[in-house]
């Protein structure tokens, strides 16, 4: 399915006498918003079943972060290594820390890297696990923490602070991932971070020349056709809501093409049984 086909199919969905006028720039805005809205909804259900995994399979990617550096001067966090996530990073799926022993001991050899799955760390969790013997970070129990590390630079002409611009849409600096694995880093050194992640969806843009052309010259959408129909549903809902269209109340139930996962259906059924 192409970008212009999405445009035409959305017009078919909202077609009626009182159909709102749709400027091309408005369409581009609502279409890309619909894509992000759909991706975020499916990400919340990712890996719940094969259906939800397949929905975003075109956006999945794997990257090896090897340019890791050790943070110094922070005795509280101890062994903390940082690295920059890929420029097309959108959401994280999994994180694996790659350690290399500094010497041979026991069953470990300096030539054999060790792969340990890292757990997600939040700001509120850190104060609770730092002194918990069973949960505190160590080599066998590393944590990852993602934050936006703005790096200020000094403009040589004005002397003012500026920030290094990132190349990904929506970000003004590279996104940083931290691996925390305790205070002792003398025996195991973090040499890499392997991340599975969702990529930023491609920006879809139509021009008036593409719309007026007899031949469809717009780019092909990266999602499979059945996902494109779900994106159209999100787009139509946004357009109808913007125009205060009363058909919005009936459009969503009628156009339910993909049923929610079994667990969600059970929760909905239980809520209805209880009078919710």
Image: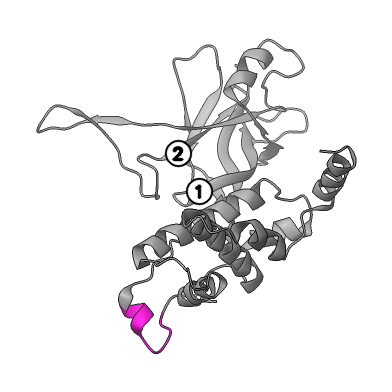
Q: Residue at x 40, y 40 (%)?
A: 174
SS class of the residue under badge 1? strand
- How far across and how far down the image is residue 219, in percent? 44, 75
**Colouring mode (rainbow / by chain / secondary structure / one colour):** one colour
Q: Residue at x 59, y 44 (%)?
A: 92
Q: Is residue 241 above or below residue 182?
A: below
Residue 82 visible somewhere in the drawing? yes
- How far across and how far down the image is residue 223, in percent? 58, 67
Residue 123 is a magenta residue: no
Q: Which mark is residue 89?
A: 1
Q: Is residue 175 above or below residue 72?
A: below
**The N terminus: image quadrant:** bottom right
Q: Which mark is residue 193?
A: none
Judging by the rendered image, the residue that carries numbered circle 2 is 175
Q: Earlier in the sequence, mark 2 or mark 1?
A: 1
- How far across and how far down the image is residue 138, in percent? 67, 22
Q: Residue at x 39, y 50 (%)?
A: 169
Q: Confirm or deny contact between disc 2 and disc 1 (CB under 8 A).
A: yes
Q: Residue at x 77, y 50 (%)?
A: 48
Looking at the image, the residue that sits furthest to the bottom is: 214
Give the extent of the magenta segment: 209-217
């Amino acid at each position: 399915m192409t970008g212009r086909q999405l445009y035409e199919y959305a017009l078919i969905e909202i077609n009626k006498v009182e159909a709102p006028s749709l400027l091309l720039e408005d369409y581009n805005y609502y279409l890309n918003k619909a894509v992000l809205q759909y991706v975020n909804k499916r990400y919340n259900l990712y890996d719940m079943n094969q259906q939800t995994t397949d929905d975003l399979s075109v956006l999945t990617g794997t990257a090896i972060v090897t340019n890791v550096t050790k943070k110094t001067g922070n005795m509280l966090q101890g062994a903390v290594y940082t690295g920059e996530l890929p420029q097309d990073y959108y959401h994280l799926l999994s994180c694996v820390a790659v350690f290399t022993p500094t010497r041979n001991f026991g069953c470990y050899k300096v030539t054999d890297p060790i792969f340990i799955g890292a757990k997600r760390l939040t700001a509120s969790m850190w104060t609770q696990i730092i002194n918990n013997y069973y949960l505190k970070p160590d080599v066998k129990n590393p944590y990852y923490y993602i934050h936006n590390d703005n790096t200020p630079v000094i403009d040589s002409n004005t002397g003012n602070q500026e920030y290094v611009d990132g190349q990904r849409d929506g970000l003004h600096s590279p996104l940083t991932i931290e691996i925390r694995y305790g205070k002792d880093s003398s025996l195991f050194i973090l040499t890499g971070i392997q991340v599975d992640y969702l990529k930023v969806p491609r920006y879809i843009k139509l021009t008036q020349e593409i719309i007026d052309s007899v031949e469809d010259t717009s780019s092909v959408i990266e999602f499979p056709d059945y996902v494109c129909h779900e994106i159209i549903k999100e787009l139509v809902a946004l357009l109808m809501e913007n125009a205060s269209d009363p058909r919005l109340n009936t459009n969503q139930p009628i156009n339910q093409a993909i049923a929610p996962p079994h667990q969600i259906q059970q929760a909905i059924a239980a809520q209805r049984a209880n009078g919710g």
